[in-house]
Amino acid sequence: DAKTTQPNSMESNEEEPVHLPCNHSTISGTDYIHWYRQLPSQGPEYVIHGLTSNVNNRMASLAIAEDRKSSTLILHRATLRDAAVYYCILRDNTDKLIFGTGTRLQVFP
Amino acid sequence: NAGVTQTPKFQVLKTGQSMTLQCAQDMNHEYMSWYRQDPGMGLRLIHYSVGAGITDQGEVPNGYNVSRSTTEDFPLRLLSAAPSQTSVYFCASSSTGFAYNEQFFGPGTRLTVL
């Protein structure tokens, strides 16, 4: 399975944008880039996914580099409820999700 | 829809005891899986199933058994609990066969083995 590299932690102030980076230099052409987050004491929840083009949904945006070796999850206006661990995961054509250690996002009022 | 449900929420066992963690989903998903999460760590895949009657091992299968007799249920069995199995266990499900499918996670079972 291709690996991802994320910073251990990041901080943001409330209502500011947050850019969470992910490096995946060994990504293959058919791997999808998925982001999940885990709020305290909860199971992970899906945030967004993409293949080649940038993607937007109600929760976040995903910006994918042209060479696909990196991506960035963008929270446009962080709220206290966005404090969580964010996982960047590459999915191949199997169903398995392989989690790394993720980025712990702290949001300050 | 209830989504993915797990029981119990909390459990304390003594070393050597056995128990079954229950997981059920009502979304008619073919794929189901079990993860464990140790403090400060990411989730590690224990076992998974791509449909009724089909199971396979993940990253950390030792000490755990699974079976999949129905689409809805995917129980995880600990035959002889050990302190190293103290962890939070999450069950997940999704449709299968497409790398863009969203996976749905249950709320977790917090297990302590004394």
Image (tube, rainbow, N blue to C red):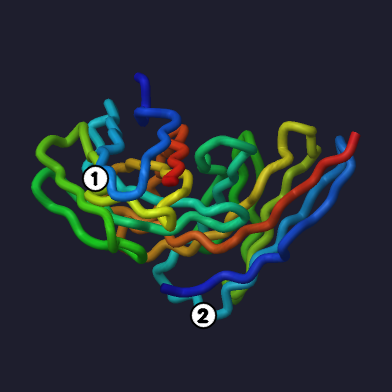
**Farthest top residue?**
B1
Would residue A109 be found to the left or right of residue A41 on screen?
A: right
Instruction: Tell me the chain of label 2.
Output: A
For the N terminus of chain A, give its image quadrant: bottom left
Estimate how packed mark 1 is, as few (under 14), some (14 to 19) or many (20 or more) residues with alpha carbons within 10 Å. Answer: some
Tell me where residue B2 sits by quadrant.
Answer: top left
- Residue A51 got which mark? none
Rendering coords of residue B61 (x, y %): 29, 61
Rendering coords of residue B67 (x, y %): 15, 46
Residue at image position (44%, 61%) is A98
Q: Are marks 2 and 1 in contact (CB under 8 Å)?
A: no
Tell me where residue A66 sits by quadrant.
Answer: bottom right
Would residue B104 be found to the left or right of residue A14 on screen?
A: left
- Residue A26 got which mark? 2
Instruction: Tell me the chain of label 1.
Output: B
In this rendering, the answer to whether B31 lies above or below B55 is: above
- Residue B77 got which mark? 1
In this rendering, the answer to whether B45 lies above or below B76 is: below
Question: What amino acid is labelled 2 in the image?
Answer: Thr
Q: Which of A33 and B60 is in front in this view?
A: B60
Residues under labels 2 and 1: Cα distance? 36 Å
Residue at image position (42%, 62%) is A91
For the C terminus of chain A, give its image quadrant: top right
Q: What element carries label 1?
A: strand
Would residue B55 be found to the left or right of residue A58 on screen?
A: left
2 or 1: mark nearer the eye? 1
In this rendering, the answer to whether A26 lies above or below B2 is: below
Q: Nearer the viewer, residue A80 or B68?
A: B68
Rendering coords of residue A29 (x, y %): 43, 74
Question: What amino acid is labelled 1 in the image?
Answer: Arg
The reply to the same-chain question for discs 2 and 1 is no
